Amino acid sequence: MILRFDHVNYVYDADGGQPVHALSDIDLTIGEGEFIGLIGHTGSGKSTLIQHADGLLKPVSGRILADGEDIWEEKFDRKALRARVGLVFQYPEHQLFEEDILSDVCYGPMNLGCSAEEARERAVSALRQVGIGEDLFGQSPFDLSGGQKRRTAIAGVLAMQPEILILDEPTAGLDPRGRDEILALARTLHEERNITVVLVSHSMEDIARFAKRLLVLGDGRLVFDGPTGEVFSHRAELEEMGLEIPRPQRLLEALKEHGFPEIGTGAYTAEEAARLILRELEKR
């Protein structure tokens, strides 16, 4: 599935006395099989942007196109779109409500019109994908750990078999182990099922580790759109927007200024930075 934002504008309280321009002339394409990072300071428009992706918000002007079709045309099936574009909000476990895990994950497919049997098949498959064993299917969602709740909530979206999965701060509030599990799950879904993933995060390290393409929003405008490493090379502009570059990159730049003038600085993950540092130490 190819999703296109065609010069999209959105204004909150457009008819009121204090309109807020949340998105301004957003023009971008989300292609098939991409892993995209989305960053920006609080209030930059990230949440507004992703809510346009599956038709939760309608542009004031411009168009959202799914495989070339305007999703706001009268004939377009937006209910089907919301199955194809899975949106996992921050703290999705707050939306768990059924008595047991399996019933909760069945809810989405049933709402799409699946039979009880098909919904159960989808739910079981989705739960297995996120690493929830059958011994937990009958458990109340509220008896799970934080990471298990998060994975169950993601399974509820996966059971609708999306082609695009949008994760809004998926690691918020999790301990390091839970965070790593969720990010590893996103990578597995991308690599093994070719699901397009859009990762919204405040963690530059997570973005650097997983996203191949990076979108940067600032005051409702798309400021950068390109390969992750290339975007992170714009340190001054990002810092002016209130965003930091990844810590490994900051470490390398500090080393370059303090005794390692020849060390490379084009590394954005801890593994890449370690290789550059070891290489420089071996020279000495």
Image: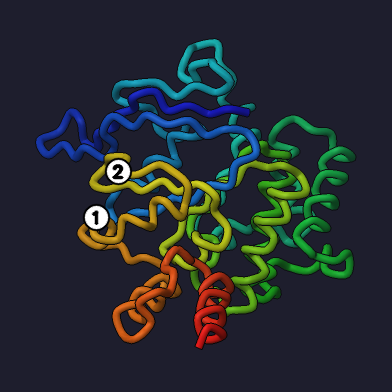
Towards the viewer: 61 or 264 = 264
| Residue named by callout 1 | 237
Give the colouring mode of the picture: rainbow
Would residue 283 be found to the left or right of residue 60 on screen?
A: right
Percent across and percent down for residue 128 are 83, 58
**Residue found at the very far bottom of the displayed protein:** 284
Classify 174 as above or below 114. Answer: below
Which tag, 2 or 1, sits closer to the chain's start?
Answer: 2
Say what amino acid the circle numbered 1 marks.
Glu
Classify 253 as above or below 221. Answer: below
Identified at 44% across, 40% down, the residue is 51
Q: Which mark is residue 61?
A: none
Say what amino acid the circle numbered 2 marks.
Val
Quadrant assignment, res 62: top left
Towards the viewer: 261 or 97 = 261
Quadrant assignment, res 81: top right
Classify 6 as above or below 208. Answer: above
| Residue named by callout 2 | 223
Towards the viewer: 97 or 70 = 70
Identified at 63% across, 28% down, the residue is 1
Asked if the residues shown at circle 2 and circle 1 are in contact, with their CB atoms under 8 angstroms apart, the answer is yes
Percent across and percent down for residue 113 are 75, 30
**Residue found at the very far left of the displayed protein:** 17
The answer to whether residue 52 of the structure is visible from this angle is: yes
Identified at 39% across, 57% down, the residue is 232
Question: How far apart in space, not on screen, are marks 2 and 1 (Cα)?
Answer: 10 Å
Identified at 31% across, 85% down, the residue is 258
**Residue found at the very far front of the displayed protein:** 283
SS at badge 2: strand
The answer to whether residue 91 of the structure is visible from this angle is: no
Q: How would you rate the neighbour count of disc 2 (Cα within 10 Å): few for under 14, some for 14-19, many for 20 or more?
A: some
